[in-house]
Amino acid sequence: MFQDYFRSISSDKLRQPGLTRQVRGRPWTWRKSGGSGKRKSIQPSSAESNAASLRFRLSCLRKRFGVKEIDPTWPFYGVFEFAPTPQRPFWLYVTSGHSNPWHEESDGHDPASQSGAGIEFIFASAERGDWATQCLQNLLAFDLLLDVGHFPGGQPLTEGDRIPIRSPINGKENCLIRNVILSRPASLPTGFQLPSGQVDLLTFTGITDSELAFAKENGTEALIDRLQPLGFFPVTDPHRRSIT
């Protein structure tokens, strides 16, 4: 599905030529070694741990949020990791599964409509870490629960949303990044087309508590206008200071 887009699209158009593939219905990751562009390895361990982690977190949602039924497709959602490139000097994490047309037959696809939920999420990080994968998995799981109406009155995540995480994004006490905003930065891909329909790409960016308060008062775009010149948007740096 969307992985083919990331694998086949040109690096100058995407700004990050990651390589991914599906193996037996599960996401595996090709990691590129240095600037040679040669395949270093295809590692089931990373993708398996991603998928297993998401399954584990969904089981935790049963206990924490009282989720009684897990959609049989949810364990096959995951997060792909793309290493930095000369064109993109940061780590990129992208969800998988949201844009899959799980309940549609291939002969019923309409390219003019949305594919699946019509969305995948991106998280750009200044450093590599399991925390980045886990953060994006948690946000994906949250959106899945919003989509099925688990939170009364809640709506699926969309551009401009501000989401409190209520804990340090990387799990370290001295980290000030405790929230994320959801946007469509021009410097990252904003969508793509699949045979099954259109897909939007929205990006999470980490912010501090005081920045969240500023965004609530002045708007998310006003905060982005302050973050971007300093290099704090759209890439999340868990070690940065607060700007407000």
Image: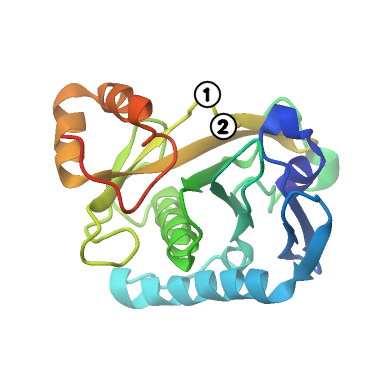
x and y, in percent, of residue 130 in the image: 48, 67
Q: Is residue 189 visible?
A: yes
- Report x, y in % for residue 218: 18, 23
Instruction: Give the residue at x 68% y 49%.
Output: 100
- The image position of residue 97, as x and y in percent, is 63, 54
Q: Nearer the viewer, residue 236 or 6?
A: 236
* Residue extending furthest toward the front: 35
Q: CA distance from mark 2 to mark 1?
A: 5 Å
Q: Please state if 141 lies on the left or on the right of 81 as rendered.
A: left
- On residue 188, which mark appears? 2
Q: Residue tagged by mark 1?
A: 186
Task: Give the camera-side residue of 86 and 113.
Answer: 86
Q: Nearer the viewer, residue 176 or 102?
A: 176
Tell me the quarter of the picture where residue 118 sits: top right
Could you tell me which residue is drawn at 44 percent across and 49 percent down? 147
Rendered image quadrant of residue 29: bottom right
Q: Secondary structure at mark 2?
A: loop
Q: Examine the rendered structure and indicate whether residue 233 appears above or below residue 50.
A: above
Q: Residues within 10 Å of mark 2 (few under 14, many from 20)?
A: some
- Say which residue appears at 31% left-offset and 67% top-offset: 171
Q: Judge left or right: residue 238 versus residue 54.
A: left
Left or right: where 167 falls relative to 116: left
